[in-house]
């Protein structure tokens, strides 16, 4: 079953259940809700279709009805939570369908049983629904919800404490009206005491929620000054950083980051953090979270780093942590931390991460790099690691510039333009310094920028006006494309002197008539940076001959007229809708309240007229209620139609302005084409004359070519004779080289034999000298051995004497011990003598051990000397035998 059929069945089941709240209709509605829950409902809320809107309106109305069964209400709330698949979906449920008031009413109706699963479910959905969302004090049942939360937080009910604290943190965040209401409660002091006690809770989630609530309520009061004073703030920093790094999950990390971001908004606390001694180590650990593949955690970490960059004292410290090489880093106090994470590389990885949902992380990373590199380049000396990081970063940035899919739709084009804007802003920051500008100029080419501008210009002119927002909106696709285009042109202007062909491409683009649209949008923008960029480009383009200044003036006038008409229509729409400024209440809620008030008036009037007609009063009221609800639905339909007509009118005005602009552009192009046609005719005549000259030149070249062929034949014959002579010369040269090589080999062998004879003669003389020296050393070694033996005997006698002295000392020691027992008064003197005696015994034992060691060493030396003596005697005998043999041979030769 497809989505449309399921939604129609669901809408029919809702209407049947409204008409009759029977068990059968409730079961049918429960079944339809479960069937829709099993389908994929992505982007259903933001589709803008009537059928899903009616279904959601009916479900929200049934969920807020106290007569609906809790099981059915729970299923409806689960389906609504499933439909809100992203932040935009939660925002639609909060703003358009007023789901916050509905869930608050459900909690109010079941406040007597706070542990009921339906109440817990409503609290959990409300926590997601109100995260980073402004909840007005005028919202229905908001006061009852706050009272319920305060009561249950004070009750210390562990099952409900975490969702209550999380929801309370959301309601208090940046909401002065809710904060004032909480401070005006009678039981606010016990509430504060309970929150103070929760700071020692064993759950990190409870601690984070509690700190968030206390920061929102007491940060600028005396209680907050005591809680976040100089004594406690550093412990708070360490606690928050530990929770961010080692938290229970993404939810805890998300609220911890929000808490630290809120604390940084206080200048005093920001100054404390800049002087925090463990700041670098904590930021290194936080950067380590970027190593994970979770885009939600990475997004919160990047949000925290961006908030730190907004504090001038922290930005330089953050640069030092990010732009330092990976390696072991030291914590304060000398303790070694784990291997440091290279924060720069982690940021670069998120630029081109393939993880789903990483697009927002990529944009946040670009914004962070903008801040950090701007700070790093503003320093007096630029570190080598920053330069190497920029060199590594540039290929990644240029790779991100390629990736536009024309068939991807407006959403893809919007993301692509945002990415280009941030990348070009980063490249412009790098161009502010000479060293980094040279790196950028080596990587960026004129063709890349030219292709980028062409693509953006085609996107600016191909986007349908019906799918765009008004030009005054920051999210308008044409505004986004125009900003990306202007950033690219500004980058081309910066690099036009350093990059080849960049200046030509830059001036060529400025004279393109399509540049009028983005330039006019920039000049009429309410952003100062865009206006300044547009003015700088206009200053460059005005002297150019083909710059369409008249078309630019018409476009600017059309944009201003459109803005004026849009402002008038918006005033009329506000007057018709009469939206109360205190809250975002939807039309369905106002219609239902008006229906109920009219029904009460009718009922009161009938009671006054006739008390005896009570049996017919309910029927009359039901009839009027049905009629009034029908009128309310028609009124809402007319209201939607009026808004659609106003939107269509604004779009028609925009189409007229664009038609006028395109007409002027077409006329200018027609004039330009006429001039081009005349120029083409003149060039055709010139080319005809040039062609006849070329024909004569070809005939002359043919005759020259025949002469060259004959000359080439003669040269080939000469070349063959030269080749034969060259071969004969090479053969003779080879024979000469071979003869020289043989001569050199014989000469080297003769020299080698001569050197060997000299070496043998020197070796014989050295052996004779060595023999004499060994004989003398042998006699000296025998004398040393005899002296060592006498010393050894003397040492043995000394050791015997020392052992005797040791025994006598031991006997004296026993006598001293006996005297100590007898004479208690002289115990100190005896202890000293005992220590002296013990020290003498130790010295004696040390001397004995050293003598024994010397004895073993002498014995080892004696054995070595004997071995050497044997070797020497053997060598002497060999020498004698050799010398005797030589003498005999000499005698025989003489004979």
Image: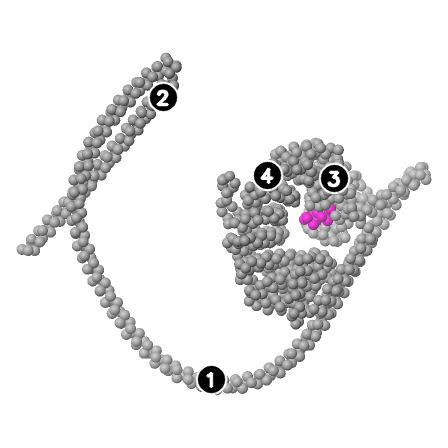
Q: Earlier in the sequence, mark 4 or mark 3?
A: 3
In space, the residues marked 4 and 3 are separated at their CA atoms by 28 Å
Q: Residue 705 shows which numbered tag? A: 1
Specify few, some or many for label 2: CA neighbours under 10 Å numbering under 14, 14-19, or 20 or more. few
Provide the residue span drawn in magenta: 80-94
Residue at image coords 35%, 16%: 817
How far across and how far down the image is residue 816, in percent?
34, 17
| Residues at marks 1 and 3, CA–CA distance in whole angstroms | 101 Å
The secondary structure type at the circle numbered 3 is helix
On-image quarter of the C terminus = bottom left
Q: Dot 3, crowdedness within 10 Å: few (<14), some or many (≥20)?
A: few
* Label 4: element kind: helix
Mark 3 vs mark 2, CA separation in Å: 81 Å
Q: Is residue 526 left or right of residue 436?
A: right
Task: Give the residue at mark 2.
Answer: 832
Q: Secondary structure at mark 1?
A: helix
**Of the numbered discs in the image, which one, if any, rests on residue 715?**
none
Residue 645 in view of the camera:
yes
Mark 2 → mark 4, Cα distance in angstroms: 56 Å
Q: Position of residue 129 (x, y in %)?
A: 70, 44
Mark 1 or 4: the one toward you: 4
Question: Are dots 4 and 3 in contact, CB under 8 Å?
Answer: no
Q: Which numbered disc, 3 or 2, marks the residue closer to the eye? A: 2
- Residue for badge 4: 234
Q: What label does residue 180 carry, if any?
A: 3
**Left or right: 130 in relation to 745:** right
Does 93 lie within the magenta span? yes
Q: Earlier in the sequence, mark 2 or mark 4?
A: 4
Q: Position of residue 9 (x, y in %)?
A: 76, 49
């Amino acid at each position: 079953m497809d989505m449309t059929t399921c939604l129609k069945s669901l809408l029919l089941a809702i209407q049947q259940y409204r008409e009759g709240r029977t068990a059968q209709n409730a079961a049918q509605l429960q079944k339809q809700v479960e069937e829709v829950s099993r389908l994929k409902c992505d982007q259903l809320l933001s589709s803008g279709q009537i059928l899903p809107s009616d279904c959601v309106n009916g479900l929200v109305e049934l969920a807020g009805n106290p007569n609906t069964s809790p099981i059915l209400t729970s299923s409806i709330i689960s389906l609504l939570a499933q439909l809100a698949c992203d932040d935009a979906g939660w925002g639609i449920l909060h703003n358009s369908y007023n789901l916050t008031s509905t869930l608050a009413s459900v909690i109010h109706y079941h406040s007597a049983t706070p542990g009921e699963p339906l109440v817990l479910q409503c609290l959990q959905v409300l926590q997601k629904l109100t995260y980073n969302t402004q909840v007005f004090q005028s919202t229905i049942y908001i006061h009852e919800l706050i009272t319920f939360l305060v009561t249950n937080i004070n009750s210390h009910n562990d099952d409900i404490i975490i969702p209550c604290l999380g929801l309370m943190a959301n309601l208090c965040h940046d909401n002065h009206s809710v904060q004032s209401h909480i401070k005006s409660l009678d039981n606010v002091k016990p509430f504060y005491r309970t929150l103070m006690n929760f700071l020692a809770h064993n759950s990190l989630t409870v601690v984070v929620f509690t700190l968030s609530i206390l920061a929102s309520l007491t940060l600028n009061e005396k209680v907050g000054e005591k809680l976040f004073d100089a004594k406690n703030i550093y412990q708070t920093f360490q606690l928050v950083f530990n929770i961010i790094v080692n938290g229970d999950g993404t939810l805890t990390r998300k609220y911890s980051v929000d808490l630290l971001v809120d604390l940084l908004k206080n200048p005093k606390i920001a100054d404390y953090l800049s002087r925090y001694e463990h700041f670098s180590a904590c930021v290194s650990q936080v950067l380590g979270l970027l190593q994970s593949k979770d885009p939600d955690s990475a997004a919160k970490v990047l949000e925290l780093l961006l908030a730190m960059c907004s504090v001038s004292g922290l930005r330089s410290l953050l640069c030092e942590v990010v732009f330092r090489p990976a390696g072991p880093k030291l914590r304060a106090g000398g303790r070694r931390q784990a291997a440091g994470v290279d924060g720069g590389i982690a940021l670069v990885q998120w630029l081109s991460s393939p993880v789903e949902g990483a697009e927002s992380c990529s944009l946040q990373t670009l914004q962070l790099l903008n801040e950090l590199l701007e700070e790093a380049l503003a320093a007096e000396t630029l570190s080598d690691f920053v330069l190497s990081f920029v060199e590594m970063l540039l290929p990644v940035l240029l790779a991100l510039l390629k990736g536009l899919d024309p068939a991807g739709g407006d959403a893809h084009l919007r993301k692509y333009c945002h990415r280009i804007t941030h990348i070009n802003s980063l490249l412009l920051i790098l161009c502010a310094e000479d060293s980094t500008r040279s790196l950028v100029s080596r990587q960026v080419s004129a063709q890349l920028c030219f292709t980028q501008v062409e693509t953006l210009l085609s996107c600016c002119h191909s986007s349908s006006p019906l799918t765009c927002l008004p030009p005054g909106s920051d999210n308008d696709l044409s505004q986004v494309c125009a900003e990306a285009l202007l950033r690219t042109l500004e980058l081309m202007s910066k690099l036009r002197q350093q990059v080849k062909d960049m200046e030509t491409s830059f001036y060529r683009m400025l004279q393109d008539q399509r540049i009028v649209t983005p330039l006019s949008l920039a000049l009429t923008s309410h952003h100062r940076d865009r206006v300044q960029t547009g003015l700088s480009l206009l200053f460059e383009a005005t002297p150019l001959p083909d710059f369409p200044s008249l078309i630019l003036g018409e476009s600017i006038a059309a944009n201003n007229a459109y803005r004026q008409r849009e402002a008038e229509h918006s005033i009329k729409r506000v007057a018709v809708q009469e939206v109360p400024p205190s809250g975002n209440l939807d039309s369905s809620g106002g219609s239902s309240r008006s229906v109920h008030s009219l029904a009460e008036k009718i009922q009161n009037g009938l009671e006054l007229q006739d008390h005896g007609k009570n049996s017919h009063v309910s029927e009359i009221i039901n009839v009027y209620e049905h009629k009034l609800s029908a009128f309310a639905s028609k009124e809402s339909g007319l209201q939607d139609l009026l808004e659609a007509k106003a939107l269509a009118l604004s779009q028609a005005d925009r189409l007229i302005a664009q038609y006028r602009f395109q007409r002027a552009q077409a006329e200018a192009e027609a004039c330009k084409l006429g001039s081009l046609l005349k120029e083409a005719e003149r060039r055709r005549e010139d080319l005809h004359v040039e062609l006849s000259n070329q024909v004569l030149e070809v005939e002359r070249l043919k005759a020259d070519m025949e002469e060259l062929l004959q000359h080439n034949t003669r040269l080939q014959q000469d070349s063959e004779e030269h080749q034969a002579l060259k071969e004969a010369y090479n053969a003779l040269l080879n024979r000469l080289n071979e003869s020289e090589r043989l001569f050199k080999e014989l000469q080297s062998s003769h020299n080698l034999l001569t050197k060997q004879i000299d070496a043998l003669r020197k070796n014989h003389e050295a052996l004779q000298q060595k023999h004499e020296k060994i004989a003398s050393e042998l006699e000296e070694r025998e004398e040393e051995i005899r002296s060592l033996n006498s010393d050894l005997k003397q040492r043995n006698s000394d050791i015997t004497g020392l052992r005797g002295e040791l025994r006598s000392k031991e006997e004296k020691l026993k006598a001293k011990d006996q005297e100590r027992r007898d004479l208690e008064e002289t115990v100190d003197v005896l202890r000293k003598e005992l220590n002296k005696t013990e020290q003498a015994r130790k010295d004696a034992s040390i001397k004995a051990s050293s003598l024994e060691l010397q004895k073993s060493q002498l014995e080892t030396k004696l054995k070595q000397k004997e071995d050497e003596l044997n070797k020497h005697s053997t060598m002497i005998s060999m020498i004698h035998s050799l010398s005797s043999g030589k003498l005999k041979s000499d005698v025989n030769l003489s004979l």
